[in-house]
Amino acid sequence: MKRLLLALLLLVHTASATAQVRSQDYIRDLVELAGILGGAHAIRVACNGRGDQYWRERMSGLLALEAPEQSPLRRSMVDAFNRTFSFESERRLVCDSEAGDGEAAYAAQGRIIADRIAARLLPKRPASQRQ
C-alpha cells in the first residue's frame, strides 16, 4: 500500500511538471489527494503511534512541489489533510482489522485521482510506443 500511494505522489508530481496551467479540476484533485493522505496518516498513527509520520511527510513533499508558498491552494490542501485526519482520528481510536481496509480504500481513491490527473495532463502515446 505504501508503494501505491508513493507512486501516486510521483505521478502527481510528473503530471504537475507537464502542466502549464492549473485547471479547477486539477486543483480539486490535489485537494482531494491531500485529504486522502490525511486519512491514511490518521490510520497509520492509530496503528503505529504518533511517531509514524510517513504520510505526513509525503504530504509535506506534495506541498513543496505543488504549493511551496502561502496561497489559497496550500491552505485548501492543508485544510483537507487536517479535516480528514481529524475525522479518521475520531473514528478509529484503535487499530483494528477495519484499519487495513480503510487504508486500502484510501489507496484505491488515490489511484482513481492519479489516473484522472494522468489522463488529463499526460500526453497519450500511440500503442506502438507503450511498453
Image: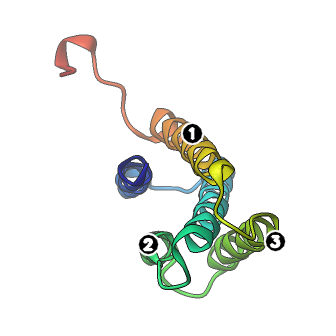
Instruction: Tell me which amino acid carries mark 2.
Output: Tyr
Does 5 sit above or below residue 48? above
Q: Residue at x 38, y 56 (%)?
A: 6
Earlier along the polypeptide chain: callout 1 or callout 3?
Answer: 3
Percent position of residue 56, x then y: 51, 76
Nearest to the eye among marks 1 and 3: give it: 3
The residue wearing badge 2 is: 54
Number of residues whose C-alpha sits closer than 10 Å to that of mark 1, classed few (under 14), some (14–19) or many (20 or more): some
Image side of residue 70 versus residue 84, left or right:
left
Earlier along the polypeptide chain: callout 2 or callout 1?
Answer: 2
Distance of label 2 from label 1 (alpha carbons): 18 Å
The residue wearing badge 1 is: 108
Q: Residue at x 42, y 71 (%)?
A: 65
Instruction: Tell me which amino acid carries mark 1.
Output: Ala
Distance of label 2 from label 3 (alpha carbons): 20 Å
The reply to whether the C-beta atoms of the residues labelled 2 and 1 are less than 8 Å apart is: no
Callout 3: helix, strand or loop?
helix
Image side of residue 75 versus residue 47, left or right:
right
| Residue nearest the viewer, comparing 13 with 109 | 109
Number of residues whose C-alpha sits closer than 10 Å to that of mark 3, classed few (under 14), some (14–19) or many (20 or more): few
The residue wearing badge 3 is: 90
Callout 1: helix, strand or loop?
helix
| Residue nearest the viewer, comparing 114 with 25 | 114
Does 12 sit above or below residue 44? above
